[in-house]
Amino acid sequence: MKKLLTILLCLLVLIGCSSQPKQSFDGKDRPSVCGRLQVIDGRLCDKNGNPVMLRGVSNNGVSVSRSFSNEDSYKDISHFLGANIYRLALYTYGVGSVGYCTGGDKNLLMQDIIDGVEWGRRQDMYILIDWHILSDGNPNKYIDEAKIFFDEVSKKCAKAENVIYEICNEPNKCSWDDIKAYAEVIIPIIRANDPESLIIVGTPNWSQDVDVAAQDPLNYDNIMYTLHFYSATHKQELRDKAKSAMSRGLPLFVTEFGITASSGGYPVDEDEANVWIDFLEESGISYVMWNFARTGEPCAALNFASLKTKDLTEEDLTRAGKWLLDTIASRSRK
């Protein structure tokens, strides 16, 4: 009888454990420990000069992610997914309220970002504020709006040690000279309010031509450069570009990647994604996956059938979401 009770007790414990969400949070490389980040010898480092790795996820756009604009969702991103960085993608161009510069409610969108910075601080995550250039191509198209936005947001976030600024997501159909000219206007505006800030600059060809930027880098401290990839589309040739840029000392940050085609659709290529992650981990390059959303696309992390906005479990994740959960859990504990 005693043996039977012991077996039943063990079964109950196993059932209870299996019903609990997997917890990836490990407290490593968090703002509470690392403070304001900096770039030293081409590597992302903490306030004391120790190398750090950021691993996280991006939202699908600030204006279309309002259902996840609450601290409960940020808690899930930090403690369930295990992310130590969350990217807030503010589309500059879009239909109606989608685009900050094309009819969006600027005050509401700004408040979403400021709230996100605070929720990120409470949940011990870095927040990447992304000026999401995409369809507009050349960042100079809305440079006047960018000047106003970055002046305002850097004043509001000057004391927030968990903030990183990404000043142009994916410049395209423009040259590095165009991007560099834009950056040389925006960086001093941010630095006037937030002098020790970490700033990430997009690179030509949808942030793939990092080797081009490496030939003529910006003359500022605490600057990193964007590298984007989608594993079913971008393979060794793009990693070779990254290696070329790093050989010249260019500090890289993957502010967006996916395990799908570059469209965000099929096919899904986990094998190539794992090759990419091995490369990034070996190179000390931080990375953020696209995206924390419920869109029905294979790049989205959340199951379209789930309506939950908090207390997520693995059942609420897509294939991409489960891959990210496992990747962060396995890599952050090494």
Image (cartoon, rainbow, N blue to C red):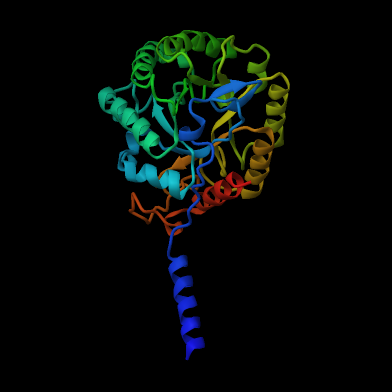
Please name whichever residue, 116 or 276, is drawn nearer the observer in this view of the structure. Answer: 116
| Residue 254 locus on image (x, y percent) | 57, 31
Query: Left of 292 or right of it: where is 115?
Result: left
Q: How many marks?
A: 0
Residue 283 located left or right of residue 321: right
Closer to us: 117 or 68? 117
Q: Is residue 168 left or right of residue 45?
A: left
- Who is closer to the viewer here, 135 or 119? 119
Q: Position of residue 240 (x, y in %)?
A: 72, 30
As drawn, the residue found furthest toward the front would be: 2
Image quarter of residue 86: top left
Q: Is residue 253 visible to the viewer in this orientation of the structure? A: yes
Q: Position of residue 168 (x, y in %)?
A: 48, 21
Q: Does residue 96 show up?
A: no
| Vertical order, 148 against 160 (above or below) | above
Q: Residue 137 at x, y = what percent?
A: 48, 20
Based on the displayed image, in which of its 4 quarters is residue 287 positioned?
Answer: top right
Nearest to the observer: residue 244 or residue 284: 284
State which quadrant residue 74 falls in: top left
Residue at the image point whose x is 62% and y is 21% from the top = 40
